[in-house]
Amino acid sequence: MHFSKTYAQLLLSLPPELRENAIQYRQLKKLINQVVRELSSLGLSPAVLQELLEYSKNESDELTKKKGKKRSEDGEEFDEDPSASTSAQRHHLPHLVYEVTKDSGRIEPHLRLWVDPPSHSSGSSPHTLDTQEDSLTPRTETDADDEEDQHGYNHGTRPQMSLLWALQRQPWLSANREGRDAVEVPTARISEVLEDDPDPASLDHDHPSFDHDRTPNEVVIPLAADMEFFQTLSTALEGLSAHMATVQSDFVDTLVTLSRTIAHSAHPASSSSNTFHPHSAVTSKPWSISISAKAKSDLYSWREIFQLYVEAEVFESIHELDRGERSVEESENRLKLFAERVTQRGLGDGRKLKLQSSRDALETFLELNVFILNIKKFQFANAEATRKILKKHTKRTSLPPYPLVPRTQSTSLPRVLVQAIGETLLPIIPHLDDYACLICTSIAFKPIRLSCGHLFCVRCLVKMQKRGSGDCPMCRAPCVLQADRSNVDWALLNFMQDWFPIESKEKLQQNEREAAREELEELGLNPDQTCRVM
Amino acid sequence: MSLPKRIIKETERLVADPAPGITALPHEDNLRYFDVTIEGPGGSPFQHGIFKLELFLPEEYPMAPPKVRFLTKIYHPNIDKLGRICLDILKDKWSPALQIRTVLLSIQALLSAPNPDDPLATDVAKHYKENEADAQRVSQEWTQKYAN
């Protein structure tokens, strides 16, 4: 399928506000046609243009290599040496360069052309004109009965001067270079410079070689259609990046609102308990606070949803081997998978989300993700459209590719949005991994803060002390053996009970079982052995 | 005795998100015993070699370090004929905050930076100290011969 079709279809699948800001591929395609027409009106069909540009490139390479040599050989040698004559003949081709200036913020493409001025010595050559003749009227010499007439240079039907002719009149050029408007010159046919080459045989004798030391004439041809093409494209790209900035700020606003809603529906036990004091060290029953049926909270459901979301790695991989942004298809699949898992676990409805506000928030959360996916598709399509249209431009016109660099952000917008979720939304619910003991990987309950500042669970530190390992596992500071009751981090202990009531309770029970078992082992009993009465 | 949560977590991550150039797979019948491969680091005489190791997590793990041994013959001043490795974190510098993953990365780093001043294979260390280029040549030969 043609790209323009796939592109149009893809845009149709996106929300209208995105579609409206897309790169207008079809319109640009039409503009390319105009550029081609403009160039053809100059006689620069793609093939001609390519030849000229290639020749100019080679020539400038050659010139730098041969400059000194050519001067010493000089003109007469070329006349006598038939092999050299081809080289002389090649200098009939003008030196052509495609340039794009960006002065005053506008992209202005033009062709810059240098033509070797002809020699004065031979009047018989069709290329040799009297440079004294600086009148603007077309030339009417009778001796020019050859190719020139075929091309209709001097026909009265043509109001403007032929470019070939004009190019050879230096005074005219210098007088007009400044004031010339964009329409005047492009009507001339540059290609005739090319087509006008006499055959080598006649050249050998009739045409003396050009003087290479003379400065060539220079002419600048603005390309109006080409300018419109680039202007349209770059305006579109700028509009696009402006729109993306709006999108981003809207997204962040929605995200902040959503964070508040979820924070409210996933509040910890403390927010509804009058007896709770965050910094109290006198909790007689540390696990007494639990989520009561009265104070509805979807804390655990939201934690599970966020956990599933993080594990789904929808937009970015955090694996060591394939770290980075995922493709559109991959993200789409993973988002689908995430939604499936949420449903499977009953997190999408009243079974686990007790509050209506939670269910609404989940919907919004999913919408935000679909939105990121759309932006991802949209940006990919636009980048592809830009790349393709520039490629088409090069291919159709033979003009060398111009690196039109759109002002892009250093990181892609989808990435920025995903990061916003990670920074704004996900942290509103504390994650277990941030409160885990590095040794046993369970919640660090009860939390012991060593004098070096590192935190472990009491159970692991007791084990270390029994083994006589005195260095902190993180920084090797010799502070493990000094740790005692005073090292309990009460504030954190209360925080953990508040936000992780279930995990804290489980860990406490597990600690007790393990300690009891150890005691038995230390007494020389096998705890796995069933009790037998002798 | 059931497997501690920590070992289960470590194993899951080793399989799901392996460190580049390192694989570690537990035996089905003994989840504390791992088959390990380490790719020779680029720029070292062990480059392009794939070295097999065995790793065992003792009952006391993570309070006690894992036991690791090279199964592939290797010409390295800190690894002896039996494949035993002279690496401080596997002995007195062990910390329960270290993991299987970090241990294997340290071993990979040891291949890049042999330490002949703390030798286990004294003859290899002597060779490395007296003529490093020649010793590296032998290491490379052994890598081609045994570590494929």
Image (cartoon, coloured by chain):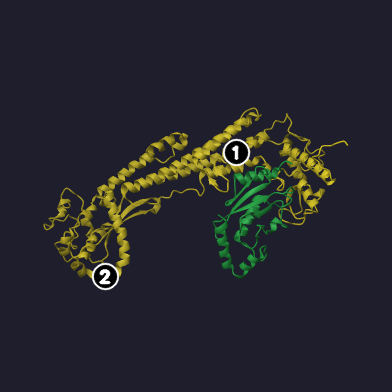
Task: Tell me the element at label 2.
Answer: helix
Q: Would you call the spot at circle 1 few (<14 residues within 10 Å), some (14-19), or many (20 or more)? A: some
Q: Is residue A396 left or right of residue A86?
A: right
Residue A469 lies, with reference to residue A232, above or below; the image says below
Q: Which of B22 and B17 is in front in this view?
A: B22
What amino acid type should be assigned to the residue bearing mark 1?
A: Tyr
Query: Which chain's colour is green?
Result: B
Q: In this view, does A267 lie to the left or right of A414?
A: right
Q: Is residue A274 left or right of residue B83?
A: right
Query: Which chain's colour is yellow?
Result: A
Q: Which residue lies at the image location 16% right of the left edge and 61% below the top edge?
A: A201
The disc numbered 1 marks a residue on which chain? Answer: A
Task: Tell me the element at label 1.
Answer: helix
Q: Position of residue B94 (x, y in %)?
A: 71, 55
Residue matched to label 1: A309
> Residue A2 got which mark?
none
What amino acid type should be assigned to the residue bearing mark 2?
A: Arg
Mark pair 2, 1: CA separation: 74 Å
Residue lying farthest right? A534
Q: Which of A351 and A385 is in front in this view?
A: A351
The first of marks 2 and 1 along the sequence is 2
Image quadrant where residue B26 sits: top right
Residue lying farthest left? A142
Task: Report whether residue A96 is seen.
Answer: no
Residue matched to label 2: A71
Q: Position of residue A493 (x, y in %)?
A: 76, 43
